[in-house]
Image (cartoon, coloured by chain):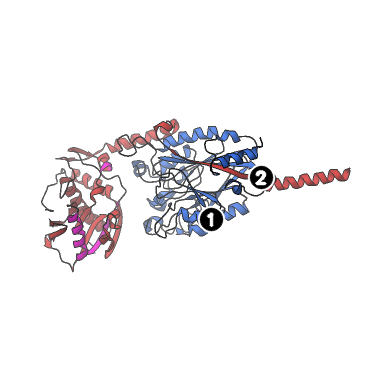
Chain colours: A blue, B red
Amino acid sequence: MDRRRFIRSVAAGTAGITLGTVPYELFAHEDFITISILHTNDIHCHIEPFTGTNERYANKGGLARIAKLATLQRQKNPNTLLLDAGDMFQGTPYFNYFKGELMLKVMSEAGYDASTIGNHEFDNGLQGIKNPLPNAEFPIISSNYDFSDTILSGSFPEYKIFKRDGVKIGIYGVGIELENLVGKKNYGDTVYNDPLVVAQKMESFLKNDKKCDLVICLSHLGLRYRDKKVSDLDLAAETSFTDLIIGGHTHSYLEKPLEEKNKLGQPVIVNQAWWGGLVVGKVDFVFEKSKRNKKAVYSDLL
Amino acid sequence: MRQTISYLLLITCLLFTFSCTTQFVQKSYEIENVSVSEEVGTMDSTIVELYTPYKNILEKDMNRVLAISENELVKDKPESLLTNFLADLLLEQGAVVANSQQLNLKPAVSFFNYGGIRSALPKGEITVGNIFELMPFENELVLLELKGDKMQAFLDYIADHGGGSVGGVQMVIAGDKATEVKIGGEEINADKSYWLVTNDYVAAGGDGLEMLAENEQFVNTGEKIRDVIIDYLEELADNNQQVNPKLDGRIR
């Protein structure tokens, strides 16, 4: 059976969107490459699972368990990225006692590939970010905060491109407005730029200039709001080249990731993984090595 | 023949160039949110090894005794040993913090949101761990200046909720209103302004406390409520005093 047709028919057979329970190994032929994204947000220093006496989350969650899940996933598919959408800091005594140091050490050991800046990262001020930062062996990506006039100038890349089996994955990051959310003395001269404008600039740069095959946004804006505050769903509707928005801040529990339409009417996945390491989001993108077909094949799938 | 070969070469080169720029096409995706529970797997042993020394330090400090309490302190309404203890502590510490930050003000009323008091305090030794259980949130101490009518509206809210953790005030609940209100021993004056010390969570107008958002002035001291409690208890012990709050009929 022709492989391309096979995938199409599978896709059509599952409401034209997901591949259902077909294991990725089926596509592990040299013509097909699966990029697996594992993601978390708002871990809030929940390094260990919640204690057994916790009323709601007894023995659930925790980075120590997520690290194990990530290791197993990497054994299954080496083309795996482990990402986080911010608010790593604050929430357990591990933060009160060791500031960000232990959290960033544990995230590095767990093999995080990238994270972004949440509002709670500012809880001990700019110095409170700068001090533990050498413990992070992964980039903390921030595209819309301008730290130029602060002690953190140059600490955070605007974007990062990962290459996995030839597939280029471009990642940018957007953070929430700090005014009225974070004390002025804690964010100092950090400048907040409009995340929608920045996202459009970054995604075009990554897709068109850098020729990324996959564009991911790490966002700490929040999933949705009743008022006009900019959210991940706004971002999804206003962007054109972003394939996946990994969100945080609103601690949203989603049964499964959301499939939205972008500005061009094409699909964009928006997800959030609750908080405290209670959920890990998992998105597998299947790519085909192509020599002729220049167009993305969303139209085949929908 | 030669021409054919060179054409083939050219085409190959073109194909090569072309395939370099359009190598990958996204065919499909699969999405899933995985619940992280015991069933999905064990903890990573390297991570456990990494945090264990930190955990040991933490646990040692969590077991540190801050002060001794003569009674078990449990929260209740309209007043209780725990709600009175916390409110009086906050009123005192609010003044200390305001003084150390040279704010030139003294809070007249204090308020802890009832839902934010997460556990009881034991009779006997009170440890750092007990305070983390009591106050797991990272709330900060804030000071609000309220006009007399807003202060009355706030106390009506307390009355409507059957009492709570307030200091500096005496009042009688009559239906859903606070009556016979005295602040610092004096009758409440609608034209006067009063400073209220509380946490940043309620100061933002949460929990139906919109009147607190309608303040004259607002100061976020940046001091964590939990730290303020710990400081207070340490000082008590340093002065050879015990925790011994009383019921005084502040809310009847």
Q: Identify the secondary structure beneath mark 1.
A: loop
> Residue B49: x and y, percent?
41, 32
Q: Do dots 1 and 2 share one subunit?
A: no
Q: Residues within 10 Å of mark 1 (few under 14, many from 20)?
A: many
State the CA–CA distance, disc 1 to disc 2.
23 Å
Q: Quadrant of residue A289?
A: top right
Residue depicted at 80% across the width and 44% down the height? B9
Residue A73 located left or right of residue B91: right
Q: Is residue A160 above or below residue B146?
A: above
The residue at which mark 2 appears reads as B23
Q: Residues within 10 Å of mark 2 (few under 14, many from 20)?
A: some
Q: Quadrant of residue B118?
A: top left
Q: Identify the secondary structure beneath mark 2.
A: loop
**Magenta-drawn segment:** B132-161
Residue A53 visible in the current orientation: yes
The residue at which mark 1 appears reads as A239
Instruction: State which chain disc 1 sits on.
Output: A
Instruction: State which chain disc 2 sits on.
Output: B
As drawn, the residue found furthest toward the right would be B1
Q: Nearer the viewer, residue A189 or A217?
A: A217
Where's the N terminus of chain A, which quadrant?
A: top right
Q: Which amino acid does label 1 sit on?
A: Thr
Q: Quadrant of residue B197?
A: bottom left
> Residue B117: x and y, percent?
24, 46
Contact? badges 1 and 2 (CB < 8 Å):
no
Is residue A231 one of those drawn in magenta? no
> Residue B140: x and y, percent?
30, 52
> Residue B18: x and y, percent?
71, 48
